[in-house]
Amino acid sequence: MAVANSKARDLVQNQTPFKGSNTFAEVISGIYVVFSYGYHFPLFACVNGKWYENGDKYSPSTSKQKSQLHPLCETEVLDTNSIKLIYR
C-alpha cells in the first residue's frame, strides 16, 4: 500500500505494513518496524504493544518523517543498533 507519510500515522498505530515517501514499515520476526530511507535506519519498533523510538541524530527530512509517523504513545528511546537487535 503506497501512502503519503502525512497520512500514515494511523497505519503505524495499527501496525499495518506500508510504503511511503522514503519510508516503509514491515513485520520482521513478528515485530513491527518503521524504517526511513532503508533498512539501515529504523525509526520505530513495536514489540508486544511496547514501542521503541530511535533517538539517534538524523537529517531534517528524517526528523519530519519521524514526526509524521510517531505512534503518539509512550516510547522507550534507544539508539539505532539497539533497535536493530530487537528484530534481528
Image (tube, rainbow, N blue to C red):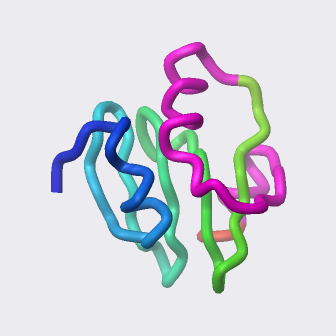
What residue appears at the point 50 percent right and 18 percent down from the top-left corner? 61
Q: What is the quadrant of residue 40 in the picture?
A: top right
Task: Using residue 59 as the reference point, say whether residue 56 is left or right of it.
Answer: right
Q: Residue furthest top?
A: 60
On whether residue 53 falls in the magenta region, the answer is no
The percent position of residue 35, horizontal first and vertical second, equals: 48, 46
Task: Using residue 37 as the reference point, say whether residue 18 is left or right of it.
Answer: left
Q: Quadrant of the N terminus?
A: bottom left
Image position of 67 with respect to 28: above or below: above
Image position of 34 with respect to 54: above or below: below
What residue appears at the point 78 percent right and 56 percent down from the top-left corner? 82
What residue appears at the point 38 percent right and 64 percent down from the top-left corner? 26
Q: Which residues are magenta?
A: 58-85
Task: Using residue 9 as the reference point, say whether residue 87 is left or right of it.
Answer: right
The percent position of residue 85, horizontal first and vertical second, equals: 71, 64
Q: How many marks?
A: 0
The percent position of residue 86, horizontal first and vertical second, equals: 69, 69
What residue appears at the point 35 percent right and 38 percent down from the top-left corner? 5
Task: Using residue 18 as the reference point, say whether residue 31 is left or right of it.
Answer: right
Image position of 58 with respect to 29: above or below: above
Question: Camera-side residue: 51 or 37?
Answer: 51
Q: Quadrant of the C terminus?
A: bottom right
On whether residue 60 falls in the magenta region, the answer is yes
The percent position of residue 31, horizontal first and vertical second, equals: 54, 76
